[in-house]
């Protein structure tokens, strides 16, 4: 045991490698966990498109614009990163992954709101579009944005109708005051009528009992009494008309609204959501398949790099080209067979539906061989340290490749690394081939990027072998 420890400590690079490996669990945990530490707490960075197509409607001779009010509310809402765009921009953004959902307020939004207390109420609708194929977890989190808009709409509608009902109650109250005034006029008119009738009766009695000389005076009373009777009758008619008018107006006002069960239900829950998806995803397994496939191929490349002797040259490889070519043939064969076995497992055992089979197989082989060449170069150039660097590169890409949660929900470091991570393009290309859409990085562009990395690694591997071949030739000539 002591002898082995002495041997280990005598090799400086081995010591460095062992110490570095000790930190791998820490690095892995720090990278993976910090990249997804609290995605639901960072939804304010998740972009969601809002399209307002609503047109003004009339309610009680007033124009209402519910859509504009909702947009104004959302502009002060920090729950999500709201983008107010037109319908074509919203759809294109959802397809490409620029937005994780689009919410459309249709043209009849305000008109349907105005109908909620009529005898034919119409439910308000929100049209929602998501793309679970681009990011299933992003789509799930974006669903909260729909709830936020629903809540805002319901609040606006309840506020609108509460205001209208209170206006109606106040107007009815004024009508009742006017009606009360009319009733008082009726009372006064009745009293005057009774008094006048008494005067007429008294005058007639006096006329009957008097001598002809005072007849003129009594007749004058009779005439005055008749005038008051006429006036009382006029006031009685005026009071009756006023009472009738005011009560009719109040009745018409309240009759304009319908207070049935369906009206109450729609005001309580005024919004329904019409959901459409750009892609169809059956479950979490299918949604995470691109990430797991890319990761699995990388793990296979790491395992291969720990076994295969990249730094040794067989006796038959007497030239640089033969050495380089023989190593490449093994590396590419391993990468191709590895991809083939995984394709069979994905398609036949797991039976994951693939929208574009040709693109899927092509990207699978490109990814597998790209990972193989990256690890081959690192190990050929740096030996065991190369294995460590390969694992470190994997750990870094786990948090930066947007394999699980949307990149907007990670921290700034991983967002900065994201465009430079090869696995970013591998996952995007796999998603597009499996789910059949064109994202913000088209499939062809992702293929070219990975192919460029693959070609670069082949050239770098050749440079390593050139350096080592030259060194071996120099050593051999010195020994000779």
Image: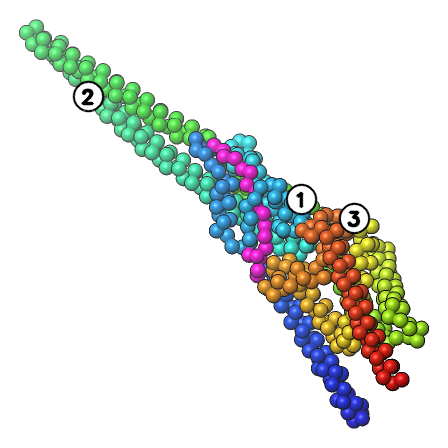
Circle 2 is placed at which residue position?
A: 195
Residue at image point 77% right, 52% down = 434
Circle 3 is placed at which residue position?
A: 355
Front-most of 289 and 147? 289
Q: Quadrant of residue 234?
A: top left
Residue 271 in view (yes/no): no
Secondary element type, mark 3: loop
Looking at the image, residue 231 lies above or below residue 2: above
**How many neighbours does mark 2 have within 10 angstroms: few (below 14), some (14-19), or many (20 or more)?**
some
- Alpha-carbon distance for marks 3 and 2? 98 Å
Circle 1 is placed at which residue position?
A: 276
- Which one is earlier in the sequence, the residue at label 3 or at label 2? 2
- Which one is earlier in the sequence, the residue at label 2 or at label 1? 2
The part of the chain drawn in magenta is 41-58
In the rendered view, does 189 fall on the left or right side of 87? left
Secondary element type, mark 2: helix
Residue 447 x %, y %: 76, 55
Looking at the image, residue 204 lies above or below residue 271: above
Residue 316 x %, y %: 94, 73
The mark closer to the camera, 3 or 1, is 3
Looking at the image, the residue that sits furthest to the left is 213
Quarter containing the C terminus: bottom right
Residue at image point 35% right, 25% down = 245
Callouts 3 and 2 close, C-beta under 8 Å: no
- Which one is earlier in the sequence, the residue at label 3 or at label 1? 1
């Amino acid at each position: 045991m002591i002898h082995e420890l002495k041997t280990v400590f005598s090799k400086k690079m081995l010591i460095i490698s062992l110490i570095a490996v000790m930190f791998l669990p820490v690095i892995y945990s720090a990278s993976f966990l910090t990249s997804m530490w609290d995605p639901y707490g960072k939804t304010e960075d998740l972009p969601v498109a809002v399209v307002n197509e609503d047109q003004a409607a009339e309610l009680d001779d007033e124009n209402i614009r519910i859509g504009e009010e909702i947009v104004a509310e959302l502009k002060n809402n920090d729950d999500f990163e709201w983008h107010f765009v037109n319908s074509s921009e919203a759809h294109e953004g959802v397809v490409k992954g620029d937005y994780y959902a689009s919410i459309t307020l249709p043209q009849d939004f305000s008109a349907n709101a105005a109908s909620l207390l009529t005898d034919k109420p119409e439910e308000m609708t929100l049209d929602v579009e998501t793309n679970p194929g681009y990011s299933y977890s992003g789509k799930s989190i974006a669903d909260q944005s729909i709830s936020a808009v629903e809540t805002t709409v319901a609040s606006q509608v309840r506020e609108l109708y509460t205001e209208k009902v209170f206006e109606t109650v106040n107007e009815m109250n004024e009508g009742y005051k006017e009606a009360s005034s009319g009733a008082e006029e009726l009372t006064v008119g009745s009293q005057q009528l009774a008094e006048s009738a008494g005067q007429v009766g008294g005058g007639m009695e006096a006329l009957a009992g008097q001598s002809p000389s005072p007849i003129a005076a009594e007749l004058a009373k009779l005439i005055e009494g008749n005038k008051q009777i006429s006036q009382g009758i006029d006031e009685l008619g005026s009071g009756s008309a006023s009472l009738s008018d005011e009560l009719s107006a109040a009745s018409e006002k309240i009759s304009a609204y319908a207070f049935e069960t369906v009206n109450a239900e729609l005001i309580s829950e005024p919004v329904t959501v019409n959901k459409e998806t750009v892609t169809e995803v059956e479950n979490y397994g299918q949604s995470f398949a691109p990430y797991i496939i890319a990761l699995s191929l990388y793990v296979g490349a790491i395992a291969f790099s720990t076994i295969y002797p990249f730094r040794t040259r067989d006796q038959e490889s007497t030239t640089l080209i033969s050495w380089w070519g023989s190593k490449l043939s093994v590396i590419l064969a391993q990468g191709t067979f590895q991809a083939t076995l995984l394709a069979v497992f994905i398609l036949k055992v797991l039976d994951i539906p693939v929208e574009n089979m040709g693109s899927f197989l092509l990207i699978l082989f490109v990814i597998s061989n790209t990972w193989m060449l990256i690890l081959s170069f690192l190990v050929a150039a740096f030996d065991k340290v190369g294995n460590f660097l390969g694992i470190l590169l994997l750990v870094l890409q786990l948090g930066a490749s947007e394999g699980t949660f949307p990149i907007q929900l990670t921290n700034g470091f991983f967002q900065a690394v994201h465009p430079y991570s090869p696995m970013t393009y591998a996952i995007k290309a796999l998603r597009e081939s499996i789910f059949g859409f064109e994202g913000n990085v088209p499939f062809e562009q992702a293929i070219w990027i990975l192919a460029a990395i693959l070609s670069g690694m082949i050239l770098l591997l050749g440079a390593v072998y050139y350096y080592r071949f030259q060194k071996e030739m120099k050593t051999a000539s010195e020994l000779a």
